[in-house]
Amino acid sequence: MSSSGDIVVDPRQSNPRLKTDPWSRYVAKAIGLFAPRAALNFLHSRAVLSHYTGASPKGPDQGWNPPNKSADAVLARDRTRLLARARDLERNSSHVSGAINKICNNVVYTGIFPQARLKTSDGKLHKAHNDRIEEGFQLWAEDDLVNFYDLQELFVRHSWIEGEFFLHRFWDEDLREKGLVPLGLEILETDFLDSSKNETGSSGNKVKNGIEYNLQGRPVAYWMFKEHPGDCLWGSTFNESVRIPATEIKHVFHRRRASQGRGVSWLASIIMEMRDFSEYQSSERIAARLAAAFGIFIESPYAEHQMTHPLAGTDQDTPSIADIPKYMEPGRIDVLPIGMKISAAQYNRPGQTYEPFTKTSLKSASTGSGLSYENFSNDYEGSTYSSARQAILEERRGYRKMQFFLNRHPNNWVWKSWIDYARLAQMLGSLPQRVPVQWQNPGWPWIDPQKDARGAQLELGMKITNRRRLAAERGLDWDEEIEELAEEEAILKEKKLNATEE
């Protein structure tokens, strides 16, 4: 470089035909009329900047050549192994299993409940109709044959572990006999889809990885095994797949690429990280057990000390090797033969690198899980109030996004299916084809109740929020809270008690 900081190119060592765009060559010609060397420097700089260093074929990453295929093509090759590894981690890694439990506790908690939103002609909520619909749904959802709120936790678990799941609806006569809407639900794991089925039918529909698409590229059917492939014993009847119309199946997965038709485990980015960490932890546990087993060595420069003393067991004043105890007893004093000394076994475990490596690994994995390091690792040492608050707020944003995902896909589909089956069974009177619904998500308590309550009061005064929204953020139904408060006030008034006194 020159003293001015410009790049200086030796014309004797540079290619005079630099690969640049036409605009750069035009500018270089204009500059070259007055300063040829500056024009050459300009072309060289443009040529350097026209390449991405991340795609450099040289250096230590020259062997990094991942396939540039569609999302489904990449997944078709790696799906089976990725799926098995994710399931193994969830079973055997305490951190991964604990992280998924915490996510379920925050996203679903005791359940995400529907609130019917039918309105009267004047735009007000039709309380009688809405209460009747919600009561019927609640009886159906809590029945032992359905357990809808338990299924919601499975929605989250299968999304994180497998990246997808299938909901299959069917007419359940057993529910009808109980006086409930006869909507039967079952979760089909991703293994049920016949991924080996790839063909083009006579109608022009294409079956790709077990999903049948029409000419517009929309799923019209799913080819499902009759039994879970993992349950089929060796030598049993061939497990055939059957065609189920897409109207009876809800395929739930989070699309990350436009070319993606199947789900990918949400743990994919941390699988190897947590596998290596688990292996490292196992090695450290073994080393720690060795360190806890105290042992000593007896050293001697004399070869004769390696054999049993010929006078062992007889009365003698000189100690022999046979007199040395095999185990140490508290308070015991022994005299060693001449020339012998004792050395204790040393196992420095865990080493000085254990804690830094552990924290680095868990920080990386927590980033991929969307949890804070403190929450993922249960290590709150060194965290401050402000940093913990910031981490909690960021986590809750992720939980809300997952709640939105559940409500938009499986929950809404189940609600619409329940309304359809209720109309077919003529169980809730004359229902409209579409009943609006709002899902009441679990909320969280205030981090700092006094400050947060003051902030909520200010927002109400500024007219930028309302009480119903504030109640929903805490997982409460404002309408129910108002009714309970009114009932309490009436009881206090009847008992001639002042409701404002403590």
Image (spheres, rainbow, N blue to C red):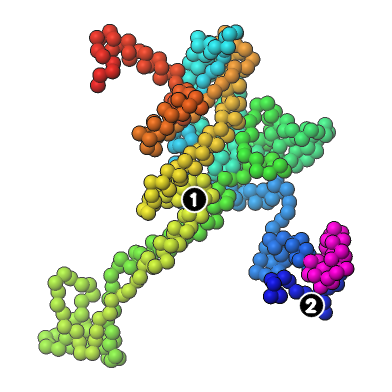
Residue at which label 2 appears: 10
Q: Position of residue 67 (x, y in %)?
A: 71, 56
Image quarter of residue 286: bottom left
Give the image location of residue 351, x and y in percent.
39, 68
327 vs 157, left or right, is: left
Position of residue 487 relative to residue 311, above or below, is above
The correct choice, above or below, for 265 with respect to 467 in the image is below
Left or right: residue 243 versus residue 204 is: left
Mark 2 Cα shell of 10 Å, populated few (<14), some (14-19), many (≥20): few
Q: Which quarter of the rendered picture does the N terminus lie within?
A: bottom right
Q: How many marks?
A: 2
Q: Amino acid at mark 2?
A: Asp
Q: Amino acid at mark 1?
A: Ser
Relative to the observer, which residue lies in front, 52 or 292? 52
Circle 2 or circle 1, nearest the eye: 2
- Residue underneath mark 1: 366
Instruction: Say if the magenta span includes residue 25.
Output: yes
Instruction: In the displayed orientation, state which residue is furthest to the front.
Output: 34
**Can you give x and y, in whole percent of width and height, for residue 101 in the image?**
45, 41
The answer to if 400 sits in the magenta stretch is no
Residue 77 in sight from this viewpoint: yes
Tell me the quarter of the image containing the C terminus.
Answer: top left
The image shows residue 324 at horizontal and vertical percentages of 20, 80
For the question of whether residue 178 can be seen, the reply is no
Give residue 335's quadrant in the image: bottom left
Residue visible at 62% across and 49% down?
80
The answer to which of 445 and 47 lies nearer the viewer is: 47
Chief secondary structure of the magenta span? helix
**Range drawn in magenta:** 18-43
